[in-house]
Image (tube, rainbow, N blue to C red):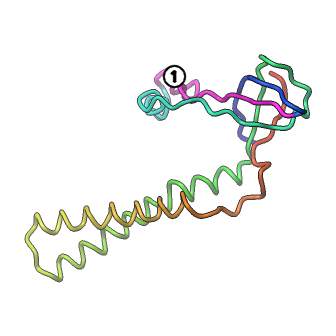
Amino acid sequence: MIEQQGKVVGINDGLIQVRLGGMNGCSRCDSGKGCGAGVFGRMLRREPVVLELENDIDASNGEAVIVGINEEVYLRLVVRLYLLPLLAGLAGAALAYYLARLAEVGPIGIDAISLLGGIVSGAAVAVRNRYFSIEFPGPGIVHLLRVN
């Protein structure tokens, strides 16, 4: 289970609203020793996410809580949202390069066509991911685990 700390910001009819911050990376990134994802998070100034979850652990307003997501679901998300667009972009660039070489355009033309092919194919998969449903097991992907 991959865990994240959040804060309860509201309670309604047995459901709680949990705010998950989007500004910081993991503790290693924050200390300058990680992969750098925290730097990108600060650069993008992502807004906090508010999830509405069932209050199974009897948390109260203002408490810090831990939420979790199953590793399998997380890996499927990573593959769908990162790996597939990356592979599509590489395949599109390779195909565009091959076609540009067959058309015998100059070196600048080959580079431009390859770049365009990679961007278009990667973006097409990203757009497909955004507008088509996903095969995850219903709305209960994120679970409220415990009060911290």
Outermost residue to the bottom: 102
Residue found at x 36% / y 64%:
90
Residue found at x 66% / y 49%:
74
Residue found at x 54% / y 25%:
24
Q: Is residue 74 above or below residue 22?
A: below
Q: Position of residue 18 (x, y in %)?
A: 74, 29
Residue found at x 69% / y 32%:
4
Q: Quadrant of the N terminus?
A: top right
Q: Position of residue 25 (x, y in %)?
A: 54, 29
Residue at the spot of label 1:
30
Relative horizontal placement of residue 148, taking residue 117 as reference (left or right): right
Q: Quadrant of the C terminus?
A: top right
- The verdict on residue 14 being magenta is no
Q: Quadrant of residue 47?
A: top right
Q: Looking at this view, is 94 or 10 the one in front?
A: 10
Q: Is residue 103 above or below residue 133?
A: below
Relative horizontal placement of residue 70, taking residue 41 as reference (left or right): right
Outermost residue to the top: 62
Relative horizontal placement of residue 140, taking residue 85 as reference (left or right): right
Q: Position of residue 142 (x, y in %)?
A: 75, 43
Count of numbered marks? 1
Outermost residue to the front: 13
Q: Quadrant of residue 143?
A: top right
Other-residue count near label 1 (Cα within 10 Å), few / some / many at <14 / 14–19 / ≥20: some
Q: Of the residues shown, which amino acid type is indicated by label 1?
A: Asp
Q: Looking at this view, is 88 or 48 the one in front?
A: 48
Q: Position of residue 112 (x, y in %)?
A: 18, 63
User: Where does the magenta region start and end?
Assistant: 15-32
Residue at disc 1, secondary structure: helix
